[in-house]
């Protein structure tokens, strides 16, 4: 259903909600007018209990196709995204086979995505040992940057970089002013930390201590200082790293940071033992840590929030019969993140406008998609309708992602995304035609 306009009492424009009529022409916002304007054509009338916000731009999603499509795939992931208000995804380069570390790997990924997208999808490249010559060709082909690990990734085809390899990749990326995004856990710290097989969540957290994040983030900061590269810290879980992040920012280094809904929603004290749906790396830490992450968002030390949707098969997730060292690490939250955090923000008197900025505008800006993540004249007409009168009771078996396991299972939220719009089209998740979305390239490519 292609819209000509949307009318709502609460439209997020320039950081403030106000009544407005948003007209759409050829997939873009044509004008933002007073709500009493009577537009021509097909109009979406948003209920008075709802907010019209920009579609979420989720720059950290593991879609896993091809190669591990039984874990997730473009069809299921983009449907989950649409149901959760995310209209743009950027897919991580690993867990698919082949990984997106060469031009050939990128082409295989792009072909797999063809005709399967309900929302727009772009791609990260990967930085692994030996592929420095592949980085600039991938950048010119339109990837949004390059992911690397400083500790084992969990899959053999995407190994980590050692210190010299990390610096070599950073120097190359700095040369063409690309972006390096880093899974920041230090392999040496993890190797020296006891990690016994255990069903205890406390033991799992102890096996991935704050020090592993601090050491890795310091390495990222040192590399940025030495090479001048743009760097981005992925899925920050440890608030103890905020001081060195603040110092790096004060120094003027080009460093950005993200965190995730599961770190802002859950706390280690409330996670039961032998519950692998909560296992992720780095881990969910304690309540005080969670509140410090919220404060860091308010203070601008953390720039954005992304899902880090990292699913697997149920068999991989329950491997070891509750032994958390054996279970796959990753939280499936693509469909629920915005609605969950809208309620968490409300509990803390944080405006919905701020949450939208962290999940839409800041993420779009991170990857240069300045036509996304905002309701403004000339921007893509990508919207989400968040209705506080629509209760959301989460049942893992009814979520759209492929494997029915979720840390959010059984939770209730007083509000959810009811409608997603991409380039003026209301996304119909029941449609057999999964062609609402497009494949994206970096704008300058």
Image (cartoon, rainbow, N blue to C red):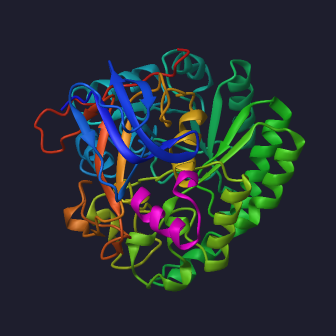
Magenta-drawn stretch, dominant element (helix, strand or loop): helix
Question: Which stretch did the figure color magenta?
Answer: 338-354
Give x and y (percent) for residue 215.
76, 57
Q: Residue at x 21, y 26 (%)?
A: 41
Give x and y (percent) for residue 167.
75, 35
Figure quadrant of residue 87: top left
> Considering only vertical position in the picture, is 246 above or below 289?
above
Which image quarter holds the N terminus?
top left
Q: Is residue 208 in view?
A: yes
**Viewer-proximal residue among 129 and 361:** 361
Q: Magenta span has 341? A: yes
Figure quadrant of residue 50: bottom left
Q: Is residue 192 in view?
A: no
Q: Residue at x 73, y 25 (%)?
A: 174
> Does residue 346 appear left or right of residue 219 in this picture?
left
Figure quadrant of residue 161: top right
> Does residue 45 appear left or right of residue 105 in this picture?
left
**Viewer-proximal residue among 198 and 234:** 234
**Viewer-proximal residue among 417 and 219:** 417
> Considering only vertical position in the picture, is 193 above or below 159?
below
Give x and y (percent) for residue 362.
59, 41
Residue at the front extreme? 36
């Amino acid at each position: 259903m292609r819209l000509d306009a949307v009318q709502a009492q609460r439209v997020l424009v320039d950081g403030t909600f106000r009544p407005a009529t948003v007209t759409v022409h050829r997939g873009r916002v044509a004008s933002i007018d007073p709500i009493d304007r009577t537009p021509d054509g097909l109009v979406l009338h948003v209920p008075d209990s709802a907010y019209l916000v920009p579609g979420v731009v989720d720059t950290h999603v593991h879609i896993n196709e091809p190669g591990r499509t039984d874990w997730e795939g473009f069809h299921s992931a983009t449907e989950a995204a649409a149901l959760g208000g995310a209209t743009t995804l950027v897919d991580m380069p690993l867990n698919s086979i082949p990984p997106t570390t060469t031009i050939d790997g990128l082409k295989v990924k792009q072909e797999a995505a063809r005709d399967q997208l309900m929302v727009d999808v772009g791609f990260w490249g990967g930085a692994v040992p030996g592929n420095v010559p592949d980085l600039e060709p991938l950048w010119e082909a339109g990837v949004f940057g390059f992911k690397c690990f400083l500790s084992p990734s969990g899959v053999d085809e995407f190994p980590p970089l050692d210190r010299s390899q990390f610096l070599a990749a950073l120097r190359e990326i700095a040369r063409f002013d690309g972006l390096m995004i880093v899974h920041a856990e230090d392999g040496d710290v993890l190797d020296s930390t006891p990690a016994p097989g255990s069903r205890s969540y406390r033991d799992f957290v102890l096996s991935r201590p704050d020090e592993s994040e601090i050491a890795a983030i310091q390495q990222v900061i040192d590399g940025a200082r030495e090479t001048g590269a743009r760097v981005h810290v992925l899925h920050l879980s440890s608030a103890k790293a905020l001081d060195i992040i603040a110092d790096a920012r004060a120094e003027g280094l080009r460093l950005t940071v993200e965190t995730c809904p599961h770190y802002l929603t859950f706390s280690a004290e409330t996670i039961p033992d032998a519950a692998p749906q909560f296992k992720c790396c780095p881990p969910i830490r304690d309540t005080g840590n969670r509140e410090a992450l919220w404060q860091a968002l308010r203070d601008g030390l953390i720039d954005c929030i992304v899902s880090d949707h990292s699913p697997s098969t149920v068999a991989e997730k329950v491997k070891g019969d509750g032994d958390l060292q054996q279970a796959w690490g990753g939280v499936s939250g693509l469909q629920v993140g915005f609605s969950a955090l809208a309620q968490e923000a409300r509990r803390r008197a944080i405006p919905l406008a701020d949450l939208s900025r962290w999940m839409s505008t800041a993420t779009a800006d991170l990857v240069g998609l300045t036509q996304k993540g905002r309701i403004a004249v000339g921007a893509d007409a990508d919207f989400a309708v968040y209705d506080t009168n629509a209760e959301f009771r989460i049942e893992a078996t009814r979520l759209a992602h492929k494997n029915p396991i979720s840390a959010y299972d059984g939770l209730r939220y007083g509000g959810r995304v009811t409608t997603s719009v991409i380039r003026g089209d209301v996304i119909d998740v029941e449609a057999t035609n999964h062609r609402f979305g497009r494949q994206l390239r970096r704008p300058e490519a």
